[in-house]
Amino acid sequence: MRGRFTILGTSSAIPTKERNHPAVYFQWGGEAFLFDCGEGTQRQIQIAELSFYKIDKIFVTHLHGDHVLGLPGLLQTLDFHDKDYVEIYGTPGIGELVELSTTRCFYINTEDLKVAVREIPPTEEVYTVLETDTYRVLSIGLNHTVDCIGYAFEEREKFKYDRQKVKRLGLKAHHFKELKERGYTTLDGKRIEKHQLGKFKRGFKFVYITDTYYTENIFKLAEGADYLILECTYFDEDEYAEAVKHLSFNIFRTRIYPKLLGLGVKNVILTHFSRRYKDLSKFEEAIREHKMENVYLARDLMGFEF
C-alpha cells in the first residue's frame, strides 16, 4: 500500500444526520493532505482515527460555506497541537478568509503556526499548483456559480527494471547508482543505457472534482485517473442542476460517464448528495440497471487504499 484516502463528508449545502460537509483526507507516503474542509471535518477526522498533526497541505475548491467553514477551527486545532507549518491553496479570496480566521476570530499564534496561502486562478487548461520530485498537484477551473477549481494528485512516473534483464547481466549496487545518476553504466567495457533495462510506469492519479455543472474541463483533469471523486448533487433534476451549476446522476450517466471510460478513468466515486435524498437507493438502483462498472456512491468515513 502506497497510500489511502478517506471521505469525511458527502453532503451538499446542509449536512444531515448521516452525511457531513465535504472533505477528503488523503495520505501518501508520510504526508497527509486535506481536500476541502467543511463544517464538522475535525470531528470526522477523529472518528476516522486520523491525525490532525500530519496535515501539511489543504486544498480548497471554492469559498462556499459547506467547503470552508471547518477551516478556521482546524487551524486553531493545529495551533493547539503545536503544528509549526501548513500550506493552504484555494481560489482568490482564500487569503482573506485565512487572515480573518487567524487574526480576528481565533487569534492564532502565527509566530508558532506559519500559514502559507496561495491563491489559485481558475484556468481553462490544466495548471500546475505545486510539484516535487515525487508528485505534483494540478488544478483546472470548473463551471460553478463562483470561482471553483478541481484538483488532481499525480504521482510521477517511476522506472521499473526488467528483473530478468538485470539478473542476466548480473548488475550490482554500483551499477544502479550510476544508472540513477548518469542514465547509463558500463559492464565488461560495454555501455548500457537505462532505457534498455526496463520502462517507465505511470504513477497513481487521484482527482477531486466537486461543485460544477457539465464542462469539458472535467475530462482534461480526470484523464487517466485511478480514482475520480465527482459531485452528483441531484438524481434527475437536470434543469435545476444546470441552473445552480451542479451535476445530476442523469447528466453523469449520459454525458460524462461514457467519456470517462474512453479516457481510462478506472474508478468513479460519486458524492456531494443533496439532503433531499434520505437514502441513496435511487442512485444504487440506477447504477445496477445501467451496469455501470466501477462506479461507487461515497459514504461518510469510507476509505480506499492504493
Image (cartoon, grey):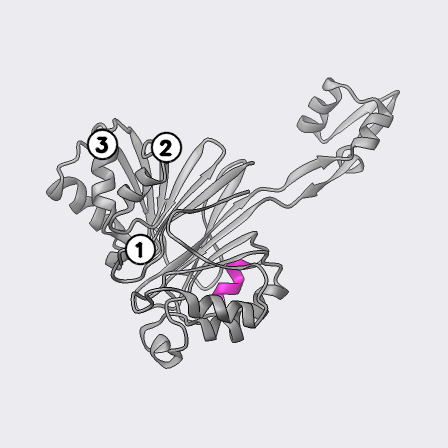
- Point out the residue furthest to the left here: 104
Q: Indicate yes or no whether the magenta region holds residue 49.
A: no
Q: Which image quarter is the C terminus in?
A: top right
In contact (CB < 8 Å): disc 3 and disc 1: no
Segment colored magenta: 217-222
Q: Main secondary structure of the magenta part?
A: helix
Marked residue nearer the N-terminal end (2 or 3):
2
Residue 25, placed above or below residue 77? below
Q: Which image quarter is the N terminus in?
A: top right
Q: Indicate yes or no whether the magenta region holds residue 220.
A: yes
**Residue type, mark 3 in image:** Asp
User: In the image, what residue occupies the spot 40% across and 54% down?
Assistant: 299
Q: How would you rate the neighbour count of disc 1 (Cα within 10 Å): few for under 14, some for 14-19, many for 20 or more?
A: few
Using the image as rendered, state which of residue 257 and residue 168 is in the foreground: 257
Residue 18 marker: 1
Using the image as rendered, state which of residue 203 and residue 290 is in the foreground: 290
